[in-house]
Image (spheres, rainbow, N blue to C red):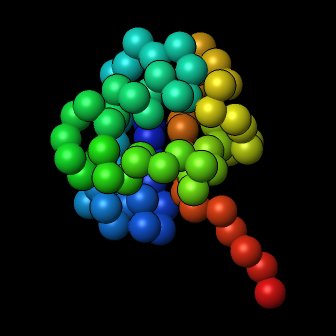
Amino acid sequence: MDVLYFAWVRERIGIPKERVDSSAATVMDLVNELRAREDRYAAAFEDVSALRVAIDQELADFDAPLDGVREVAFFPPMTGG
């Protein structure tokens, strides 16, 4: 699946997008796999309460299943003016 990173998540990891082969069943499982990769991922996903996630361009929860998913995007909450 493609994993996209936005805003400070992208800055901490250092890339905007990557292809990830994962056996994760849920978004949180994927986060745990990414955290275990390197310190930069651990820093980006240190506090998931400060993150939002979209699955195939639809907002989702961290317990959402990943079966058949093509794209997961991580980003901070957006505020409007």
- Would you place residue 22 above or below residue 38 in this image? above
Label tally = 0
Where's residue 59, x and y in %? 73, 44
- Would you place residue 24 above or below residue 46 in this image? above
User: Who's the residue at 57% across and 56% down the image?
Assistant: 50
- Would you place residue 79 above or below residue 30 in this image? below
Where's residue 32, x and y in %? 39, 29
Q: Can residue 56 be seen in this snapshot?
A: no
User: Who's the residue at 59% across and 14% down the image?
Assistant: 67
User: Who's the residue at 41% across and 46% down the image?
Assistant: 45
Where's residue 26, x and y in %? 56, 20
User: Who's the residue at 46% across and 17% down the image?
Assistant: 24
Q: Split into 4 quadrants, where in the image is the C terminus?
A: bottom right
Q: Split into 4 quadrants, where in the image is the N terminus?
A: top left
The image quarter containing residue 35 is top left
Instruction: Residue lying at the far bottom in this picture: please name it.
Output: 81
**For this view, does 13 lie left or right of residue 3?**
left
- Viewer-closest of 9 and 15: 9
**For this view, does 73 lie left or right of residue 64?**
left
- Viewer-closest of 38 and 20: 38
The image quarter containing residue 11 is bottom left
Instruction: Residue lying at the far right in this picture: please name it.
Output: 81
